[in-house]
């Protein structure tokens, strides 16, 4: 084992001050049998790393890299003029405690003003106002892709483009002030029923925002246009419908409980009744599922009959079509009823962990029976999807379109299917594209809360640091002694393309203005929703 790997394995434990979550430093982050390619780098000079994306995966990677390699130089690229990605535009406004994770990047920027550069308003690509990857990589030893999932999955069923069918991702972006969706045409006045398809936490976020008391939302950083639209909303009834059962849905107990506890909002039990849906006696359920089953059965304090607003979880219904009488606007959602492929009781072995896995993974099959829910508004909330960045193939970085990830060795090293036997743990570096790494959703798919993204980003950063200390091959190998230009080279590329990039201190000016606007309304901030307005503020 190389000395650096030994140091890495026995490394001290970091605590992220922003979220108080223990890091992975005590966990083994490199496979036992990892090998490193040509050991031609003789002297360890500071590494120069480009991080693409400033959301949780990006900022946790930067934070950890600078802990592991304090002299590292990091340049972080972000397509918007503002940092934080999903922490700013994905986390629900009524979850301010989750947004505190952004303090990690503030710590990095403030403690490392020399070693860290933020390059905002810099989309990656060949077009006007964009910076190609080929204009970035020559200046760095490593590129770490942490740009997350920029699209949502589609269902591929008839009527998906009708007016009234809205992607949950765009709705979340709209109420969180994401510039891309500033003008999203969401009509909350078309009818009193909304259907949400999918039962993950995004589906529950959407449901909560539709039903939560406005006075509570007003205190958050939800944008004013959303408050205005919600104040005119006619939606009284939200049906959150999943294709599998209550024990398979990916919602988490905290988010379920929040909805159950919304004041003056009732929860209507599903028409089938819980016994038929749950199928298994409570005492035989693994602990996590037992808690969910109990919470669902207990329901909300407010009865759905007596409340002005209500929500319901519908199960075992797979969306089949969005229907319209006039052909333009949604009138109903058609479902095909499903049933468990095997009785759930047959999946139990008595071992809590394998029972949990088996029940969570239980499959369903179509019954051929149909059902219809009349609604003028439907949210498609069936998960996010990552896409390749333009020009990735030109720098040798593949993309697995079927899985929506950059192929990697689990630790974060990008693997090329055309080089060596990559993907096999025993030959990790055989297919490793030198100097290329990935973290977060683009590395492992769009699942997990911010804490799991943090773990994952720390893992990748540890591997980058370990590879550097272990003299692995990096980008632009040369003799390995010459310091890469990093941000200085990038600055020239930006200037030659007249890209008005946004520095960290620029962002701080936007931040101050947003806080000023928020203070006037008695809230933490009022986000600026248009890129032009952000840039005008900086250049005025
Ligand atoms: P998700 O958790 O993967 O849930 C996707 C839902 O869509 C599932 O119910 C899934 O059903 C369903 N689905 C997928 N394809 C479908 C299809 N073709 N037809 C019908 N239903 C389909 O995704 P998400 O809600 O977008 O959340 C993404 C990640 O962000 C999750 O890990 C989530 O926990 C996290 N997140 C966390 C928070 C929070 O901590 N408060 C908030 C938001 C998001 P199946 O299970 O049957 O596939």
Image (cartoon, rainbow, N blue to C red):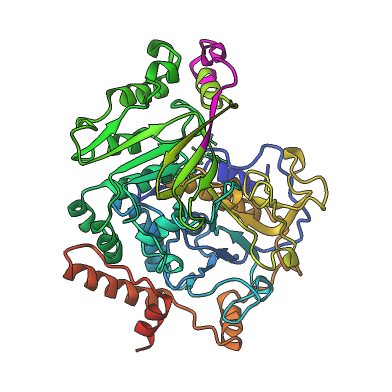
Farthest front residue in view: 326
Is residue 48 toward the left or the right of residue 231 in the image?
Answer: right
Q: Residue at x 35, y 59 (%)?
A: 175
Magenta-highlighted residues: 335-354
Q: Residue at x 37, y 53 (%)?
A: 101
Query: Percent position (x, y) of residue 393?
Result: 74, 63
Q: Residue at x 60, y 21 (%)?
A: 341
Residue 71, placed above or below residue 67: below
Residue 350 falls within the magenta-colored stretch: yes
Query: Percent position (x, y) of residue 354?
Result: 54, 19
Residue 398 falls within the magenta-colored stretch: no
Q: Which image quadrant: the N terminus?
A: top right
Q: Which image quadrant: the C terminus?
A: bottom left
**Would you identify the image quadrant in which residue 236 lies?**
top left
Query: Percent position (x, y) of residue 129?
Result: 56, 81
**Would you identify the image quadrant in which residue 265 lies?**
top left
| Camera sees residue 427 | yes
């Amino acid at each position: 084992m190389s000395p650096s790997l030994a140091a890495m394995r026995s490394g001290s434990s970091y605590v992220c001050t922003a979220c108080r979550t223990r890091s992975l430093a005590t966990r083994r982050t490199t496979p036992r049998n990892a090998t490193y390619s040509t050991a031609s780098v003789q002297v360890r000079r500071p590494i120069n790393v480009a991080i693409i994306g400033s959301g949780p995966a990006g900022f946790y990677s930067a934070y950890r890299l600078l802990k592991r390699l304090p002299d590292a130089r990091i340049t972080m690229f972000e397509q918007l003029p503002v940092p934080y990605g999903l922490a700013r535009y994905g986390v629900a406004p009524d979850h301010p405690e989750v947004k505190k994770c952004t303090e990690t990047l503030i710590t990095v920027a403030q403690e490392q003003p020399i070693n860290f550069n933020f390059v905002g308003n810099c989309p990656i690509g060949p077009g006007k106002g964009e910076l190609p990857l080929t204009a970035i990589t020559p200046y760095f030893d490593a590129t770490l892709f942490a740009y997350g999932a920029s699209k949502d999955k589609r269902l591929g069923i008839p009527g998906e483009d009708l007016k009234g069918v809205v992607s949950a991702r765009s709705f979340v972006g709209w109420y969180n002030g994401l510039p891309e969706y500033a003008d999203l045409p969401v009509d909350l006045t078309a009818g009193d029923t909304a259907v949400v398809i999918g039962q993950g936490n995004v589906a529950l976020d959407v449901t909560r925002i539709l039903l939560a008391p406005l006075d509570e939302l007003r205190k958050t950083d939800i944008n004013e246009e959303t408050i205005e639209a919600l104040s005119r909303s006619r939606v009284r009834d939200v049906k959150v419908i999943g294709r599998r059962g209550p024990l398979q849905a990916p919602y988490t107990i905290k988010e379920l409980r929040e909805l159950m506890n919304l004041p003056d909002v009732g929860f209507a039990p599903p028409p089938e009744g819980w016994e038929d849906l749950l199928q298994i006696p409570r005492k035989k359920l693994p602990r996590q599922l037992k808690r969910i089953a109990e919470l669902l059965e207990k329901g909300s304090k407010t009865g759905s009959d007596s409340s002005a607003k209500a929500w319901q979880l519908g199960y075992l219904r797979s969306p089949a079509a969005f229907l319209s009488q006039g052909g333009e606007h949604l009138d109903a959602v058609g479902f095909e009823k499903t049933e468990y492929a095997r009785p759930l009781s047959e999946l139990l072995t008595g071992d809590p962990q394998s029972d949990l896995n088996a029940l969570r993974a239980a499959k369903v099959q179509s019954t051929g029976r149909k059902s219809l829910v009349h609604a003028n508004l439907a949210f498609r909330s069936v998960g996010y999807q990552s896409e390749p960045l333009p020009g990735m193939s030109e720098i040798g970085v593949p993309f697995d379109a079927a899985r929506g990830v950059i192929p990697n060795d689990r630790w974060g090293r990008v693997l090329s299917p055309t080089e060596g036997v990559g993907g096999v743990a025993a030959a990790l570096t055989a297919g490793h594209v030198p100097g290329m790494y990935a973290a977060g959703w683009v590395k492992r798919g769009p699942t997990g809360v911010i804490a799991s993204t943090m773990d994952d980003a720390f893992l990748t950063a540890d591997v980058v640091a370990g590879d550097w200390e272990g003299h692995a091959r990096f980008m632009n190998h040369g003799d390995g002694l010459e310091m890469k230009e990093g941000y200085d080279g990038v600055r020239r590329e930006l200037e030659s393309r007249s890209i008005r990039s946004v520095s960290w201190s620029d962002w701080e000016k936007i931040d101050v203005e947003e806080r000023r606007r928020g203070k006037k309304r008695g809230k933490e901030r009022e986000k600026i929703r248009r890129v032009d307005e952000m840039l005008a503020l900086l250049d005025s």
